[in-house]
Amino acid sequence: MQTDSVLYDYIIVGAGPAGCLLANRLSQNPSHRVLLLEAGGQDNYAWIHVPVGYLYCIGNPRTDWCFKTEAEPGLGGRALNYPRGKVLGGCSSINGMIYMRGQARDYDEWAAQGNKGWGWQDVLPVFKRSENHYAGGSDVHGAQGEWRVEQQRLSWALLDAFREAAAQTGIPSIPDFNGGDNEGCSYFQVNQRRGVRWNASKAFLRPVLQRPNLTVLTGAEVSRIEFDKGRASAVVASIGKQLRTLRSRREILLCCGSIGSPMVLQRSGIGPRALLEKLGIDVRLELPGVGTNLQDHLQLRLIYKVSNGHTLNQMAGSLWGKMNMGLRYALNRSGPLAMAPSQLGAFARSGPEQATANLEYHVQPLSLERFGEPLHGFPAFTASVCDLRPQSRGTVEIRSALADAAPVIRPRYLSHETDLKVAADAIRLTRRIARAPALASFEPVEYLPGASLQTDEQLREAASLIGTTIFHPVGTCKMGQGRDAVVDERLRVHGVPGLRVVDASIMPTITSGNTCSPTVMIAEKAAQMIIEDALTDEQTVSAGIVAAPQRSAHSL
């Protein structure tokens, strides 16, 4: 094993949305030497940048880790594909590009759990700091940041009718989902620039690659963290088939996401004792919460056949249609190739007992049997609906100490009674929207799960058969102070100086919407805290004061 002679100030593991932003912010100080490690490759695959190209990126080992869950009892024993970005930009290079913050209550709940500084009024300025909104700056949007947000470049008569039908069902049309209360229906705003995907690499990394104090290595898979007198001091990474030890004098920042970050911690001997001992890994620090608290949005894909309507199924089903789509995109970056996977969104309540919207719809002018399969030959739309605040909790565990071993992912979807009730209520609400007068001219006929299913028992069974992940895993390195917490409110790993986790895994509870932009916010806030802490340390050293070691309920 080779030990590099270079001593970095910050080593960032993972170049997804969080890692790219941190690399940008921390390298602004020319005196800080920053290393960014990415296990995947460059984001130079053409289909990353064409919005509809996500179809060719998910399930592609060039851009996706291609994980799978274990067989899920709540899904009738099915194992689901579990896409995670394996490329610069991480999941922002393969996701649906939807710009969504969630609800004010999400962040106020984090703060109420003892995480000071994470309430809505605390994080709103942080969202705005990195945002570059098409409409300019306002009370709720920023215009000076790098994270580009635009309106979609096409609309559909069928989706316009669905929006009107939602209004007739009690879900009002609204212009913007991102002001703190997202209840209503609108076209999603997206992370695109003039019809091209705007991933985290373009936003935060490419503009600063020429900084002499920033080093970016791709194809660098980190196997574990090493320690010096209890402090995180180095990472061991496989780079070009060679194991190298890379040293840090300030901090190591894990940005590997809700699957990758707990895996690195567990391989480093930080995690549940029983798991580590079973795999023959020395327990450096028992942190039972590492890899627990997994939350995800499970979507129910309801498909309706339509008449008298124009959908992507017909357009993509003919050679002329495909040529026309390609021509439109080549000429002005518009048409179906500029589509996000979901165009129209709606946030609604599954019942009157809900204080805020607890359902999210992704409505698409297309349908297919399963993701990755061809579109149906008949015109149809899909109304995918997910429970925004699931109560089910799962786990992520390493399978062995080897870095190339796939993880054991058990989301435990629909294992909580409340989630089953919400799923049945969500199907009923979707049916009410489909029966609204605004959609009558399209004559929608339920294809999936099937209109004959009516009882609670039947609808719950249907949810288990059609439910699939919407790719929003969070929570596996929970922020907080309890026994199950992994990081504190400044994202420092409990009991391990010099180590932070900065990604969606720190969320105590999942946000009420898509999770990419909340992850960008988490990284922006973390960068501020890291810079503040570094300044404090420097001032302490200058004053000749020896700082007390970080105290925690856990210890090495």
Image: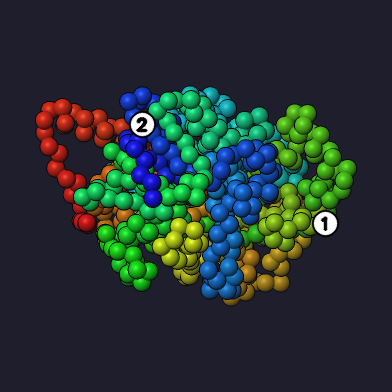
Tag 1 residue: 378
Q: Is residue 544 above or below residue 100?
A: above
Q: CA distance from mark 1 to mark 2?
A: 57 Å
Q: Position of residue 434 (x, y in %)?
A: 70, 56
Give residue 125's quadrant in the image.
Answer: top left
Q: Is residue 147 above or below residue 234?
A: above
| Residue at image coords 34%, 29% | 32
Which is more toward the observer, 108 or 169? Answer: 108
Which is more toward the observer, 361 or 484? Answer: 484
| Residue at image coords 47%, 46% | 239
Which is more toward the observer, 525 or 169? Answer: 525
Tag in front: 1 or 2: 2
Q: Position of residue 531 (x, y in %)?
A: 31, 32
Determine which of the numbered discs, if any, sits on residue 33 in the image: 2
| Residue at image coords 31%, 56% | 485
What colouring style does the render use? rainbow
| Residue at image coords 45%, 42% | 37
